[in-house]
Image (tube, rainbow, N blue to C red):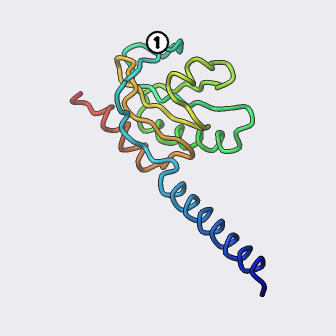
Amino acid sequence: MDGVGTLGVIALATVLLVVGAVAVTRRRFDGRVRTATAPRFTLAGVGIVAPADTVTVVQFSGQFCAICPQARTVVDRVLRDHPNLAQIEVDVAEHPEAVRALDIRRTPTLLIVDEQGEVVHRASGMPREAELRQAVSGLAAPNR
């Protein structure tokens, strides 16, 4: 193999390694429910109306989002066990200011909002059902 061919093989191997690392990293964090970090926002502060005094799961979806219906199904399944919780879906095209303010980078993104309307948990991508159940159960506990 000549010098140019060797460099091409090395470049290709490097690209494949980088793509593989990105895929593994994304898979590890995709859909993870995590505690929201400061600064905390209220939905009302970004123009989204949610039920008052109710824990709410807000799903940001897009018209061309292939997995948004599947995410909605997961949320529906989790909320069947918590009928006192609310669920709303927000179209990212209709609320660009909220998308920017809440740092929504992909769809679906779920925000779990407490009774005061403050975002306390979020998940980007396909939500992990077990983690979503744990997050809403902690907020919907009878001793809260």
**Count of picture labels:** 1
Task: Residue at the far bottom: name it.
Answer: 1
Is 42 on the left or on the right of 142, as rendered?
A: right
Neighbourhood count class around disc 1 (C-alpha, 10 Å): few under 14, some 14–19, many 20 upward: few
Give residue 143's position: percent from left, percent from top: 21, 30
Q: Is residue 48 left or right of residue 12?
A: left
- x, y percentage for residue 120? 36, 30
Q: Is residue 14 above or below residue 48?
A: below
Between 138 and 11, the residue placed more toward the observer is: 11
Q: Quadrant of residue 36?
A: top left
**Residue 14 image point, x, y percent:** 63, 69
Q: Residue furthest front?
A: 3
| Residue at (48% x, 40% y) in the render | 123
Hey, which quadrant is residue 99 in on the image? top right
Residue type at tag 1: Ala
> Is residue 49 placed above or below 29 in the rendered structure?
above
Quick one: 92 or 89, which is closer to the camera?
Answer: 92
* Rendered residue at 53%/12% (across/down): 47
Write down the residue under mark 1.
44
Residue at the image position 72 percent from the left and 80 percent from the top: 6
Mark 1 element type? helix
Quadrant where the C terminus is found in the figure: top left
x and y, in percent, of residue 3 in the image: 75, 80
Task: Say which of 89 and 122 sits in front.
Answer: 122
- Residue at 47%, 31% (x, y): give it: 111
Q: Is residue 55 left or right of residue 20?
A: left
